[in-house]
Image (tube, helix red, strand yellow):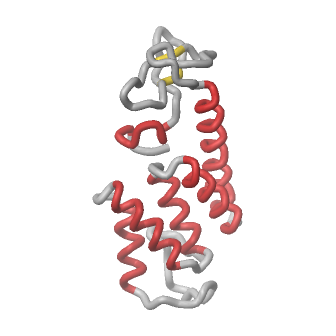
Amino acid sequence: MTDPADGPADGPVGGPVGGDATVRCPLPRCGADNPPDAEDCAGCGTPVRGHVRVTAHAARLFNEGLAAAREGRDAMARDRFAAVVAWFPADVEARNALALAALRLGDRREARRQWEAVRERRPGDALAGRGLSLLDGSPDRDAGDRGPAERDPAGRDPG
């Protein structure tokens, strides 16, 4: 879901090892690859099974949020992205998606808050930069009061 430098927010599934997927330890200091059915990390003893479940659930929520956004169900998209951000605060893709959903719902303050959090973590993030530029270049409006020509940073009509 995010940049590999963000650590465990990426998810636990590592690359193929001998053709089989592995479960990477969520602790950055360890990072050991484990068999997919491992309960605990072979390198440090950290429980990995629960992390796999949470990460898989977060990925499912993120994909549900994307589908909802494509269908114009912006409140549902926002809620799904917000859940992912709550579990994985370093996930800049989920934060960018949450900011876009907030913008589409007319919540400019929340959009700004999320894009600023992305820029703190990843200063060169282009989507966050475009979003903040959009917010800085147009006056604040009440929720739901978007002009017909206003577009979100990804180039879609938010209305």
Residue 137 x %, y %: 37, 85
Q: Is residue 28 at least partly visible in the picture?
A: yes
Q: Residue 7 lies in what quarter of the image? A: top left
Residue 111 x %, y %: 50, 72
Instruction: Find the residue positioned furthest to the front.
Output: 45
Placement of the C terminus among the 4 image quadrants: bottom right
Instruction: Find the residue positioned furthest to the left.
Output: 124
Residue 41 x %, y %: 51, 18
Residue 152 vertical position relative to residue 57 in the rendered view, above or below: below
Q: Residue 76 lies in what quarter of the image? A: bottom right
Residue 79 vertical position relative to residue 89 in the rendered view, above or below: below
Q: Is residue 154 at least partly visible in the picture?
A: no
Q: Residue at x 52, y 54 (%)?
A: 94
Q: How many marks?
A: 0
Q: Residue at x 35, y 67 (%)?
A: 129
Q: Residue at x 58, y 80 (%)?
A: 106
Residue 80 vertical position relative to residue 24 in the rendered view, above or below: below
Residue 104 vertical position relative to residue 5 in the rendered view, above or below: below
Q: Residue 125 lies in what quarter of the image? A: bottom left
Q: Residue at x 41, y 62 (%)?
A: 117
Residue 158 x %, y %: 57, 74
User: Is residue 130 left or right of 48 when viewed as pictured?
Assistant: left
